[in-house]
Amino acid sequence: MTTTAIQSRLHNAITVFGRFLRQAGYSLGTGEIMNAIEASSKIGLSNREDFRQALKTCFITDHKLIPLFDQLFDIYWRNPDRIENVSDILRKLNESRLGKAELGSMKDQVKELYKKRVEGYKEREKEEDEREEEKPFDVFLYSPEEVLRKKRFDAYTPEELEEAKIFINQWNWEFSLRKLRRLKPGSSPYRLNIRNTIRKNIFPTQDFIELQWKERKTKPRPIVILTDISGSMDHYTRILLHFIFTIHSVNRHVEAFTFGTRLSRITHYLRRKDANDALDLVNQSVKDWSGGTKIGKTLETFNQIWARRVLTGGAVVLIISDGLDTGNIELLTKESSRLHRSCHRLIWLNPNLGFKDYEPITKGVQSILPNVDDFLPIYNLDSLIELGSVLGKLDKRQSFRAMA
Protein backbone atom coordinates (compact mmCIF):
# COMPACT_ATOMS: atom_id res chain seq x y z
CA MET A 1 0.00 0.00 0.00
CA THR A 2 1.46 3.40 -1.00
CA THR A 3 1.98 6.32 1.38
CA THR A 4 -0.80 8.29 -0.34
CA ALA A 5 -3.26 5.40 0.07
CA ILE A 6 -2.39 5.05 3.78
CA GLN A 7 -2.90 8.79 4.38
CA SER A 8 -6.24 8.76 2.51
CA ARG A 9 -7.42 5.81 4.61
CA LEU A 10 -6.34 7.55 7.80
CA HIS A 11 -8.16 10.78 6.87
CA ASN A 12 -11.36 8.83 6.16
CA ALA A 13 -11.05 7.02 9.49
CA ILE A 14 -10.59 10.33 11.37
CA THR A 15 -13.68 11.77 9.66
CA VAL A 16 -15.82 8.78 10.68
CA PHE A 17 -14.42 8.96 14.22
CA GLY A 18 -15.43 12.64 14.42
CA ARG A 19 -18.98 11.75 13.37
CA PHE A 20 -19.05 8.99 15.95
CA LEU A 21 -18.03 11.46 18.69
CA ARG A 22 -20.75 13.81 17.50
CA GLN A 23 -23.30 10.99 17.98
CA ALA A 24 -21.99 10.57 21.52
CA GLY A 25 -22.86 14.19 22.35
CA TYR A 26 -19.62 16.03 21.50
CA SER A 27 -19.97 19.47 19.93
CA LEU A 28 -17.91 18.95 16.75
CA GLY A 29 -18.04 20.58 13.36
CA THR A 30 -16.23 20.24 10.06
CA GLY A 31 -13.53 22.66 11.25
CA GLU A 32 -12.53 20.46 14.19
CA ILE A 33 -12.38 17.37 11.96
CA MET A 34 -10.20 19.19 9.39
CA ASN A 35 -7.90 20.38 12.21
CA ALA A 36 -7.55 16.78 13.39
CA ILE A 37 -6.66 15.60 9.89
CA GLU A 38 -4.04 18.34 9.57
CA ALA A 39 -2.62 17.53 13.01
CA SER A 40 -2.27 13.85 12.10
CA SER A 41 -0.17 14.81 9.08
CA LYS A 42 2.26 16.78 11.27
CA ILE A 43 3.16 13.92 13.64
CA GLY A 44 4.76 10.52 13.21
CA LEU A 45 2.03 7.90 12.99
CA SER A 46 4.22 5.19 14.52
CA ASN A 47 3.40 6.48 18.04
CA ARG A 48 -0.20 5.72 19.06
CA GLU A 49 -0.11 7.97 22.13
CA ASP A 50 0.97 11.02 20.10
CA PHE A 51 -1.90 10.32 17.70
CA ARG A 52 -4.36 10.08 20.64
CA GLN A 53 -3.19 13.41 22.09
CA ALA A 54 -3.43 15.13 18.70
CA LEU A 55 -7.07 14.09 18.26
CA LYS A 56 -7.87 14.90 21.87
CA THR A 57 -6.51 18.44 21.45
CA CYS A 58 -8.66 19.04 18.35
CA PHE A 59 -11.89 17.40 19.53
CA ILE A 60 -12.26 18.11 23.28
CA THR A 61 -13.54 21.48 24.56
CA ASP A 62 -14.69 20.28 28.01
CA HIS A 63 -12.35 18.41 30.34
CA LYS A 64 -15.29 16.40 31.71
CA LEU A 65 -15.50 14.56 28.38
CA ILE A 66 -11.90 13.29 28.50
CA PRO A 67 -12.67 9.87 30.12
CA LEU A 68 -15.42 9.18 27.60
CA PHE A 69 -13.12 10.22 24.75
CA ASP A 70 -10.42 7.79 25.87
CA GLN A 71 -12.90 4.92 25.91
CA LEU A 72 -14.30 5.85 22.51
CA PHE A 73 -10.78 6.16 21.10
CA ASP A 74 -9.69 2.73 22.37
CA ILE A 75 -12.78 1.03 21.03
CA TYR A 76 -12.92 2.73 17.66
CA TRP A 77 -9.24 2.56 16.66
CA ARG A 78 -8.95 -1.14 17.43
CA ASN A 79 -11.68 -2.18 15.04
CA PRO A 80 -14.58 0.07 13.98
CA ASP A 81 -16.60 -2.94 12.74
CA ARG A 82 -17.06 -4.24 16.30
CA ILE A 83 -18.99 -1.25 17.69
CA GLU A 84 -22.09 -1.25 15.50
CA ASN A 85 -24.45 -1.79 18.49
CA VAL A 86 -22.91 1.09 20.42
CA SER A 87 -23.25 3.34 17.39
CA ASP A 88 -26.98 2.48 17.16
CA ILE A 89 -27.50 3.42 20.80
CA LEU A 90 -25.75 6.76 20.33
CA ARG A 91 -27.69 7.57 17.16
CA LYS A 92 -31.03 6.90 18.92
CA LEU A 93 -29.81 9.06 21.78
CA ASN A 94 -29.47 12.13 19.57
CA GLU A 95 -32.67 11.46 17.62
CA SER A 96 -34.84 11.21 20.76
CA ARG A 97 -33.91 14.78 21.92
CA LEU A 98 -33.72 13.78 25.57
CA GLY A 99 -33.17 16.31 28.29
CA LYS A 100 -29.82 16.88 29.89
CA ALA A 101 -30.58 14.62 32.85
CA GLU A 102 -31.72 11.76 30.63
CA LEU A 103 -28.76 12.36 28.30
CA GLY A 104 -26.33 12.02 31.21
CA SER A 105 -28.02 8.81 32.36
CA MET A 106 -27.78 7.34 28.86
CA LYS A 107 -24.12 8.27 28.62
CA ASP A 108 -23.47 6.43 31.89
CA GLN A 109 -25.08 3.34 30.42
CA VAL A 110 -22.95 3.70 27.32
CA LYS A 111 -19.82 4.02 29.46
CA GLU A 112 -20.65 0.75 31.23
CA LEU A 113 -21.14 -0.92 27.88
CA TYR A 114 -17.79 0.43 26.69
CA LYS A 115 -16.00 -0.87 29.78
CA LYS A 116 -17.39 -4.35 29.20
CA ARG A 117 -16.37 -4.23 25.56
CA VAL A 118 -12.86 -2.97 26.42
CA GLU A 119 -12.37 -5.88 28.81
CA GLY A 120 -13.61 -8.28 26.14
CA TYR A 121 -11.25 -6.78 23.57
CA LYS A 122 -8.26 -7.09 25.92
CA GLU A 123 -8.99 -10.77 26.43
CA ARG A 124 -9.30 -11.26 22.68
CA GLU A 125 -5.99 -9.46 22.11
CA LYS A 126 -4.21 -11.77 24.52
CA GLU A 127 -5.59 -14.77 22.70
CA GLU A 128 -4.59 -13.30 19.34
CA ASP A 129 -1.05 -12.66 20.57
CA GLU A 130 -0.76 -16.23 21.76
CA ARG A 131 -2.02 -17.60 18.46
CA GLU A 132 0.19 -15.14 16.50
CA GLU A 133 -2.79 -13.92 14.51
CA GLU A 134 -3.10 -10.58 12.70
CA LYS A 135 -2.42 -7.41 14.67
CA PRO A 136 -5.24 -4.94 15.58
CA PHE A 137 -6.50 -2.33 13.15
CA ASP A 138 -4.32 0.50 14.52
CA VAL A 139 -1.12 -1.44 13.81
CA PHE A 140 -2.32 -2.19 10.29
CA LEU A 141 -2.95 1.51 9.84
CA TYR A 142 0.51 2.66 10.84
CA SER A 143 2.90 -0.17 9.95
CA PRO A 144 2.96 -1.09 6.20
CA GLU A 145 5.51 1.53 5.17
CA GLU A 146 7.64 0.86 8.26
CA VAL A 147 7.66 -2.86 7.50
CA LEU A 148 8.67 -2.18 3.89
CA ARG A 149 11.45 0.19 4.95
CA LYS A 150 13.00 -2.27 7.39
CA LYS A 151 12.66 -5.41 5.29
CA ARG A 152 15.78 -6.64 3.47
CA PHE A 153 15.91 -6.23 -0.31
CA ASP A 154 16.69 -9.93 -0.76
CA ALA A 155 13.41 -10.81 1.05
CA TYR A 156 11.13 -8.67 -1.14
CA THR A 157 8.28 -10.15 -3.12
CA PRO A 158 7.76 -8.77 -6.66
CA GLU A 159 4.92 -6.60 -5.37
CA GLU A 160 7.05 -5.21 -2.54
CA LEU A 161 9.86 -4.51 -4.98
CA GLU A 162 7.53 -2.29 -7.01
CA GLU A 163 6.37 -0.54 -3.83
CA ALA A 164 10.01 0.07 -2.88
CA LYS A 165 10.71 1.61 -6.30
CA ILE A 166 7.79 3.99 -5.82
CA PHE A 167 9.14 4.94 -2.39
CA ILE A 168 12.60 5.66 -3.85
CA ASN A 169 11.08 7.81 -6.61
CA GLN A 170 9.03 9.86 -4.14
CA TRP A 171 11.73 10.38 -1.51
CA ASN A 172 13.30 13.85 -1.36
CA TRP A 173 16.97 13.17 -2.15
CA GLU A 174 19.27 16.08 -1.32
CA PHE A 175 22.97 16.54 -2.02
CA SER A 176 25.54 18.83 -0.45
CA LEU A 177 26.76 21.83 -2.42
CA ARG A 178 30.43 22.57 -3.03
CA LYS A 179 31.52 26.20 -2.69
CA LEU A 180 33.38 27.54 -5.72
CA ARG A 181 36.03 30.24 -5.86
CA ARG A 182 33.92 32.34 -8.21
CA LEU A 183 31.69 34.96 -6.65
CA LYS A 184 28.18 36.24 -7.28
CA PRO A 185 26.07 39.08 -5.84
CA GLY A 186 24.63 38.02 -2.51
CA SER A 187 23.50 39.09 0.93
CA SER A 188 26.15 37.44 3.12
CA PRO A 189 29.15 39.71 3.93
CA TYR A 190 31.83 37.50 2.40
CA ARG A 191 33.45 40.15 0.16
CA LEU A 192 32.52 43.75 -0.59
CA ASN A 193 30.96 44.35 -4.03
CA ILE A 194 32.51 47.75 -4.78
CA ARG A 195 30.87 48.28 -8.19
CA ASN A 196 27.34 47.63 -6.96
CA THR A 197 27.97 49.65 -3.78
CA ILE A 198 28.88 52.71 -5.88
CA ARG A 199 25.80 52.23 -8.10
CA LYS A 200 23.45 51.97 -5.12
CA ASN A 201 24.89 55.05 -3.40
CA ILE A 202 25.36 57.46 -6.33
CA PHE A 203 22.93 60.10 -4.99
CA PRO A 204 24.68 62.64 -2.67
CA THR A 205 21.51 63.24 -0.62
CA GLN A 206 21.77 59.85 1.09
CA ASP A 207 22.47 59.95 4.82
CA PHE A 208 24.19 56.56 4.91
CA ILE A 209 25.94 54.12 2.57
CA GLU A 210 24.22 50.84 1.73
CA LEU A 211 26.93 48.19 1.29
CA GLN A 212 26.59 45.49 -1.37
CA TRP A 213 28.26 42.10 -1.02
CA LYS A 214 29.52 39.13 -2.99
CA GLU A 215 29.29 35.51 -1.93
CA ARG A 216 30.76 32.30 -3.28
CA LYS A 217 28.88 30.35 -5.92
CA THR A 218 27.81 26.80 -5.12
CA LYS A 219 27.55 23.67 -7.21
CA PRO A 220 26.43 20.07 -6.47
CA ARG A 221 29.38 17.89 -5.60
CA PRO A 222 30.00 15.20 -8.28
CA ILE A 223 29.18 11.62 -7.28
CA VAL A 224 30.78 8.54 -8.86
CA ILE A 225 29.13 5.15 -8.18
CA LEU A 226 30.76 1.76 -8.78
CA THR A 227 28.23 -1.07 -8.39
CA ASP A 228 29.10 -4.74 -7.97
CA ILE A 229 26.95 -6.98 -10.23
CA SER A 230 28.56 -10.31 -9.36
CA GLY A 231 26.59 -13.42 -8.41
CA SER A 232 26.70 -12.67 -4.68
CA MET A 233 24.98 -9.30 -5.29
CA ASP A 234 22.13 -10.65 -7.47
CA HIS A 235 19.42 -10.01 -4.85
CA TYR A 236 20.36 -6.32 -4.53
CA THR A 237 21.42 -5.30 -8.05
CA ARG A 238 18.03 -4.51 -9.59
CA ILE A 239 16.75 -2.16 -6.89
CA LEU A 240 20.16 -0.53 -6.39
CA LEU A 241 20.35 0.26 -10.11
CA HIS A 242 16.89 1.80 -9.80
CA PHE A 243 18.20 3.89 -6.90
CA ILE A 244 21.14 5.04 -9.03
CA PHE A 245 18.76 5.97 -11.86
CA THR A 246 16.64 8.02 -9.43
CA ILE A 247 19.49 10.05 -7.94
CA HIS A 248 20.89 10.63 -11.46
CA SER A 249 17.55 12.20 -12.41
CA VAL A 250 17.88 14.53 -9.39
CA ASN A 251 21.60 15.27 -9.66
CA ARG A 252 23.07 15.30 -13.17
CA HIS A 253 26.58 15.33 -11.71
CA VAL A 254 26.42 11.55 -11.18
CA GLU A 255 28.65 9.04 -12.99
CA ALA A 256 27.78 5.33 -12.72
CA PHE A 257 29.78 2.16 -13.44
CA THR A 258 29.15 -1.55 -12.98
CA PHE A 259 31.82 -4.13 -12.32
CA GLY A 260 32.21 -7.85 -11.90
CA THR A 261 35.22 -9.12 -13.80
CA ARG A 262 35.36 -5.94 -15.90
CA LEU A 263 34.41 -2.27 -15.63
CA SER A 264 31.46 -0.86 -17.63
CA ARG A 265 30.28 2.75 -17.74
CA ILE A 266 26.46 3.06 -17.73
CA THR A 267 25.96 6.82 -17.20
CA HIS A 268 24.63 7.46 -20.73
CA TYR A 269 21.93 4.80 -20.26
CA LEU A 270 20.62 6.61 -17.16
CA ARG A 271 19.60 9.61 -19.24
CA ARG A 272 16.49 7.78 -20.43
CA LYS A 273 13.18 9.14 -19.13
CA ASP A 274 11.86 5.73 -18.06
CA ALA A 275 13.72 3.70 -15.45
CA ASN A 276 12.75 0.33 -16.97
CA ASP A 277 14.05 1.36 -20.39
CA ALA A 278 17.33 2.48 -18.87
CA LEU A 279 17.78 -0.72 -16.87
CA ASP A 280 16.95 -2.88 -19.90
CA LEU A 281 19.69 -1.12 -21.87
CA VAL A 282 22.13 -1.67 -19.01
CA ASN A 283 21.17 -5.35 -18.92
CA GLN A 284 21.81 -5.72 -22.66
CA SER A 285 25.14 -3.87 -22.72
CA VAL A 286 26.85 -5.26 -19.61
CA LYS A 287 28.29 -8.74 -20.25
CA ASP A 288 29.62 -9.83 -16.84
CA TRP A 289 26.39 -10.24 -14.86
CA SER A 290 26.32 -12.75 -12.00
CA GLY A 291 29.94 -13.79 -12.40
CA GLY A 292 33.00 -13.44 -10.22
CA THR A 293 34.40 -10.27 -8.66
CA LYS A 294 37.81 -8.75 -9.31
CA ILE A 295 37.64 -5.48 -7.43
CA GLY A 296 41.36 -4.80 -7.61
CA LYS A 297 41.48 -5.12 -11.41
CA THR A 298 38.32 -3.02 -11.69
CA LEU A 299 39.78 -0.19 -9.60
CA GLU A 300 42.99 -0.35 -11.60
CA THR A 301 41.04 0.16 -14.84
CA PHE A 302 39.06 2.99 -13.29
CA ASN A 303 42.15 4.76 -11.96
CA GLN A 304 43.99 4.49 -15.28
CA ILE A 305 41.15 5.38 -17.70
CA TRP A 306 38.36 7.19 -15.89
CA ALA A 307 39.76 8.86 -12.76
CA ARG A 308 41.03 12.00 -14.48
CA ARG A 309 37.77 12.38 -16.40
CA VAL A 310 35.21 11.99 -13.61
CA LEU A 311 37.06 12.71 -10.34
CA THR A 312 36.98 16.49 -10.81
CA GLY A 313 35.52 19.17 -8.61
CA GLY A 314 35.98 17.20 -5.39
CA ALA A 315 34.02 14.11 -6.43
CA VAL A 316 32.70 11.56 -3.93
CA VAL A 317 33.05 7.87 -4.82
CA LEU A 318 30.52 5.23 -3.71
CA ILE A 319 31.55 1.57 -3.97
CA ILE A 320 28.59 -0.82 -3.62
CA SER A 321 29.91 -4.34 -2.99
CA ASP A 322 29.94 -7.16 -0.46
CA GLY A 323 33.76 -7.33 -0.74
CA LEU A 324 33.93 -10.98 -1.82
CA ASP A 325 36.95 -10.52 -4.13
CA THR A 326 38.36 -13.35 -6.27
CA GLY A 327 41.26 -11.32 -7.67
CA ASN A 328 44.66 -10.07 -6.54
CA ILE A 329 44.45 -8.79 -2.95
CA GLU A 330 47.71 -6.81 -3.17
CA LEU A 331 46.43 -5.05 -6.28
CA LEU A 332 43.18 -4.25 -4.46
CA THR A 333 45.09 -2.67 -1.57
CA LYS A 334 47.22 -0.57 -3.91
CA GLU A 335 44.40 0.65 -6.16
CA SER A 336 41.95 1.40 -3.33
CA SER A 337 44.63 3.54 -1.69
CA ARG A 338 45.21 5.36 -4.98
CA LEU A 339 41.48 5.96 -5.41
CA HIS A 340 41.16 7.27 -1.87
CA ARG A 341 43.86 9.87 -2.54
CA SER A 342 42.16 10.98 -5.77
CA CYS A 343 38.66 11.73 -4.47
CA HIS A 344 37.12 13.99 -1.86
CA ARG A 345 35.57 11.09 0.01
CA LEU A 346 35.39 7.31 -0.47
CA ILE A 347 32.26 5.57 0.80
CA TRP A 348 31.86 1.80 0.83
CA LEU A 349 28.31 0.42 0.96
CA ASN A 350 28.13 -3.22 2.00
CA PRO A 351 24.80 -5.15 2.14
CA ASN A 352 26.30 -7.69 4.55
CA LEU A 353 26.36 -5.04 7.27
CA GLY A 354 22.65 -5.72 7.63
CA PHE A 355 23.42 -9.06 9.31
CA LYS A 356 23.92 -8.80 13.07
CA ASP A 357 26.67 -11.40 13.18
CA TYR A 358 28.64 -9.95 10.25
CA GLU A 359 32.37 -9.43 10.78
CA PRO A 360 34.81 -8.06 8.14
CA ILE A 361 37.12 -11.09 8.15
CA THR A 362 37.59 -11.70 4.39
CA LYS A 363 40.88 -10.55 2.87
CA GLY A 364 39.13 -8.35 0.33
CA VAL A 365 37.26 -6.44 3.02
CA GLN A 366 40.31 -6.09 5.24
CA SER A 367 42.46 -4.77 2.40
CA ILE A 368 40.08 -2.03 1.27
CA LEU A 369 38.61 -0.98 4.64
CA PRO A 370 41.64 1.12 5.81
CA ASN A 371 41.26 3.30 2.69
CA VAL A 372 37.54 3.99 3.21
CA ASP A 373 36.15 7.16 4.83
CA ASP A 374 32.65 5.76 5.47
CA PHE A 375 31.63 2.11 5.85
CA LEU A 376 27.83 1.89 5.68
CA PRO A 377 25.10 -0.77 5.16
CA ILE A 378 22.87 -0.85 2.09
CA TYR A 379 20.32 -3.65 2.46
CA ASN A 380 16.92 -1.94 2.94
CA LEU A 381 15.12 1.37 2.40
CA ASP A 382 16.15 2.73 5.79
CA SER A 383 19.80 2.26 4.87
CA LEU A 384 19.19 4.17 1.61
CA ILE A 385 17.65 7.01 3.62
CA GLU A 386 20.70 7.03 5.89
CA LEU A 387 22.93 7.18 2.81
CA GLY A 388 20.89 10.15 1.55
CA SER A 389 21.53 11.90 4.88
CA VAL A 390 25.27 11.32 4.48
CA LEU A 391 25.24 12.62 0.89
CA GLY A 392 23.52 15.76 2.14
CA LYS A 393 26.33 16.45 4.64
CA LEU A 394 29.43 15.64 2.60
CA ASP A 395 31.27 18.83 3.54
CA LYS A 396 31.06 18.03 7.25
CA ARG A 397 34.17 15.94 7.70
CA GLN A 398 32.89 13.25 10.02
CA SER A 399 33.36 9.56 9.41
CA PHE A 400 30.47 7.07 9.55
CA ARG A 401 31.23 3.48 10.51
CA ALA A 402 28.36 1.03 10.89
CA MET A 403 28.79 -2.60 11.87
CA ALA A 404 25.13 -3.64 12.09
Image (cartoon, grey):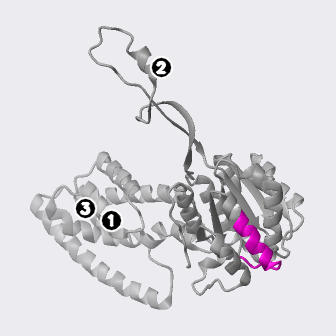
What residue do we see at 68% from left, 45% from top?
A: 252
Q: Pointer 2: what residue? A: 195
Is residue 337 covered in magenta?
yes
**Secondary structure of residue under mark 1:** helix
Mark number, residue 24: 3
Give the quarter of the figure containing the C terminus: bottom right
Boundaries of the magenta span: 323-338
- Front tag of 3 and 1: 1
Q: Pointer 1: what residue? A: 50
User: Which one is earlier in the sequence, the residue at label 1 or at label 2?
Assistant: 1
Question: Where, by quadrant of the figure, is residue 363 drawn?
Answer: bottom right
**Secondary structure of residue under mark 3:** loop
Badge 1 density bin: few <14, some 14–19, many ≥20, Cα 10 Å: some
Tag 2: amino acid: Arg
Furthest toward the left, the residue is: 101
Q: Relative to 29, is 81 above or below? A: below
**Secondary structure of residue under mark 2:** helix
Tag 3: amino acid: Ala
